[in-house]
Amino acid sequence: MVVRTGPTTAVVRTLTGPGFRDVVRLRSARGPEGILEGAGEPLCRIRMVDIREPVEPGDEVLAASLAGLDVPPPRYGVIERVEQSVGAAHWDIWMRPALVGPSPESVIVVRVEP
């Protein structure tokens, strides 16, 4: 995700990088929403998914940030692990990113100015 751009540089935060956050949907474009968080680990954490929602390993995780646009939502990854803490109102969910490997060395940023 491009965090900030300048005249000749761009700051990019990877999906698993500390501080990365985005709204996601589980299973489909109409599934329950949660907050995807990177923590510098191989798996990302998904928070704020109600414990009453059915969630299981293998479920797809899709970006919800493009909701309302006529494009298929990008796929972030697949749920690897789901746990229920005693008395918790939300699931403890860990997701394996769909794309793994080294971070890109460069990106191209197109800025549209009105």
Image (cartoon, grey):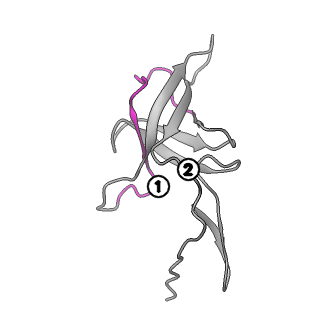
Which amino acid is tagged 1? Ser
Task: Describe residue 52's horizontal placement relative to residue 40 as left or right.
Answer: left
| Residue 76 highlighted magenta (yes or no) | no
Q: Secondary structure at mark 2?
A: strand
| Total marks in image | 2
Residue type, label 2: Asp
Residue 107: x %, y % from top left: 55, 71
Name the outermost residue toward the top. Answer: 86
Q: Nearer the viewer, residue 19 or 41?
A: 41
Taking the magenta stretch, the answer to whether it contains residue 57 is yes
Q: Mostly what secondary structure, the magenta segment?
A: loop
CA distance for labels 2 and 1? 7 Å
Q: Badge 1 is on which residue?
A: 65
Q: Position of residue 61 (x, y in %)?
A: 43, 40
Circles 2 and 1 in contact, beta carbons < 8 Å: yes
Label placed on residue 22? 2
> Can you say which quadrant of the picture contains the N terminus?
bottom right
- The residue that appears at 58% across and 21% down in the rendered structure is 89
**Magenta span of residues:** 46-68
- The residue at 34%/45% (across/down) is 29
Q: Secondary structure at mark 1?
A: loop
